[in-house]
Amino acid sequence: MASNNFIDYVKINCRSGKGGAGSHHFFRAKGLPNGGPDGGDGGRGGHIILEGNSQLWTLLHLQYQKHLIAKPGEGGGENLRSGAQGEDIIIQVPLGTVARDAETGEKKLEITEHGQRLILTPGGRGGLGNDHFKSATNQAPSYAQPGEPGIDEWVILELKLLADVGLVGFPNAGKSTLLSVVSAAKPKIADYAFTTLTPNLGVVAYRDYKSFVMADIPGIIEGAAEGRGLGHRFLRHVERNSILLFMISCDSPDINGEYEVLLSELEQFNPELLDKQRLLAITKSDMLDEELEAEIRETLPTDLPTVFISSLANKNIQKLKDLIWEALQKVRRDAPESARAGYLAEDDEPENQDEQAS
């Protein structure tokens, strides 16, 4: 997935259709000049609807479509004929798309399944025709309801990446390099911080034609949970990953301290993130000999599965895949439906791994 084509945030104006007016018509026929009310109801205005599409990975198609205007409903007619409903606008969005009110930030809805349809901005209701208002004391009502107006609002759409494994770490920890080695994804790689400014996805091939999806989340910095840098824009992508792979460079002056800072940022953003299964990869470990590696291992948490890797030297990459696969199977066993966030089933066989990499 080219980074310049990955759009995970758009602000759009949604205008639903106005409801059609009810009719105040009276029946007329030869020999019956004063027939009763027969005005039909107006049709409702068009909705603006979000529909989940598992083949979409970005909100790019909405970047330049800022105004969505649904059709109004038609007015009611004679002989109790109801007006036609306004045509709905259906917007295809990736799974993991969240809609928020642009003014209040309140969450309106979230799309999580393929084919799921939810009304984002409802159309106005059609007005009732005068037939509804006849009574014993008012047999010829000339009143009919007007249609309700549509809603004009600004909405923010945010995308939370859906993946099996989310890579979490400070800038320049080697996340993009790992993704480029284990998948066909081609993220931007350079020797400076914040090389990655948008998430990247890659399909990682595993043994016996199995696979899992890995997401390279842009580097987190201390204070990200309070919005430093692009903290909220980065951290929301972590929420929909099954497991989290923390990556810290072996040349860090305080590896355990960095890990605690990363955990703290996740907890401040969303405490539920700490319930996800975690792994730790110490990167760039081709620079270490066995003695230094043993010294570092003694400082690490004992309850956290840890592997020393080097993407450039291909050190322990297969071991890392094995750890990830084992963790994914544990997630599937513990909560096979609700906790599983991956795109590919355990036994799916990708036809072309290069084409499935983002």
Image: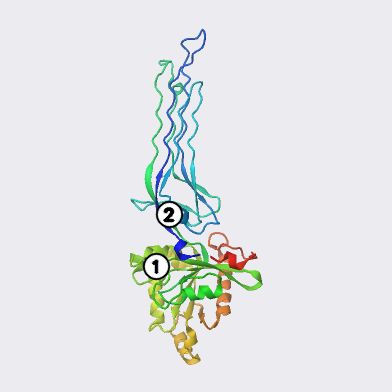
Q: Horizontal placement of 178 versus 107: left or right?
A: right
Q: Earlier in the sequence, mark 1 or mark 2?
A: 2
187 and 201: which one is in front? 187
**Residue 276 image offset from top left, x and y in percent:** 48, 67
Mark 2 element type? loop
Q: Which mark is residue 267?
A: 1
Residue 78 location (% of width, % of height): 49, 21
Identify the coloring.
Answer: rainbow
The amino acid at mark 1 is Glu
Neighbor class of circle 1 (other Cα within 10 Å; few <14, some 14-19, many 20+) is some
Tell me, for residue 63, which label it has, or none. 2
In the rendered image, residue 96, in percent from the top left (x then y), is placed at 48, 57
The extreme top residue here reads 31
Q: Nearer the viewer, residue 109 or 299?
A: 109
Tell me the element at label 1. Answer: helix
Seen as rendered, the residue at the extreme right is 208
Indicate the amino acid at tag 2: Gln
Residue at point 55%, 77% (across, down)? 320
Few, some or many residues within 10 Å of mark 2 (<14, 14–19, 20+): some
Does the rendering let one see residue 59?
Answer: no
Residue at position x 33%, y 69% in the image: 223
Name which residue lies at 45% across and 37% down.
Answer: 71
Determine whether 334 is above or below 305 in the image.
above
